[in-house]
Amino acid sequence: VQLVESGGGLVQPGGSLRLSCVASGFSFSDYYMAWFRQAPGKARERVASISSSGSSTDYADSVKGRFTISRHDGRNTVYLQMNSLRPEDTAVYFCKAMSLNFWGQGTQVTVSG
């Protein structure tokens, strides 16, 4: 199993980023996928999830209306579009297949201006 996150970076408050996660080693289209984040000194939290069919999504209250999760099964990729970013969104972002106990290395998102 491999999960490779990318797309993070430094952005000013109010800006946008699009994260990508390419998965391999399992049948991607069969799995719920999710994005988590972990800020310094805080517990890892789930930000968004998407069903295997892509028809159902769920978001943490803190990002609802600003973040959008999507998937492209032909590319084994899950995305997180992040708009209206805030300093409190600063964290390392990870993707995960919900029933697999495996984490990628994550991608750093820093919102500062």
Image (cartoon, rainbow, N blue to C red):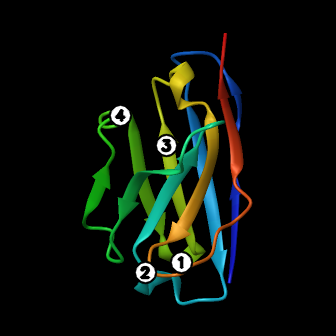
Inspect the image, locate mark 3, and give the three-letter code of the amino acid beneath it.
Answer: Gln
Q: Nearer the viewer, residue 63 or 88?
A: 88
Q: Nearer the viewer, residue 57 or 87?
A: 87
- Ranked by sequence position, the earlier of labels 3 and 4 is 4
- Ranked by sequence position, the earlier of labels 3 and 2 is 2
Q: CA distance from mark 1 to mark 2?
A: 14 Å
Residue 8, image x, y percentages: 69, 41
> Would residue 7 be seen by someone viewing this image from the given angle?
no
Inspect the image, locate mark 1, and give the three-letter code of the amino acid beneath it.
Answer: Gly
What residue is rendered at 29% in x and 55% in y? 58
What residue is rendered at 43% in x and 81% in y? 31
Frontmost of labels 3 and 2 is 2
Instruction: Assign the N terminus to one quadrant of the image.
Output: bottom right
Q: Quadrant of residue 64?
A: top left
Q: Rate crowding at label 1 as few (under 14), some (14 to 19) or many (20 or more) other CA atoms within 10 Å.
A: few
Q: Quadrant of residue 65?
A: top left
Q: CA distance from mark 1 to mark 4?
A: 30 Å
Contact? badges 2 and 4 (CB < 8 Å) = no
- Ranked by sequence position, the earlier of labels 3 and 1 is 1
Q: Rate crowding at label 2 as few (under 14), some (14 to 19) or many (20 or more) other CA atoms within 10 Å.
A: some
Element at label 2: loop
Contact? badges 1 and 2 (CB < 8 Å) = no
Element at label 1: helix
* Residue bearing mark 3: 81
What residue is rendered at 45% in x and 69% in y? 33
Inspect the image, locate mark 2, and give the three-letter code of the amino acid beneath it.
Answer: Tyr
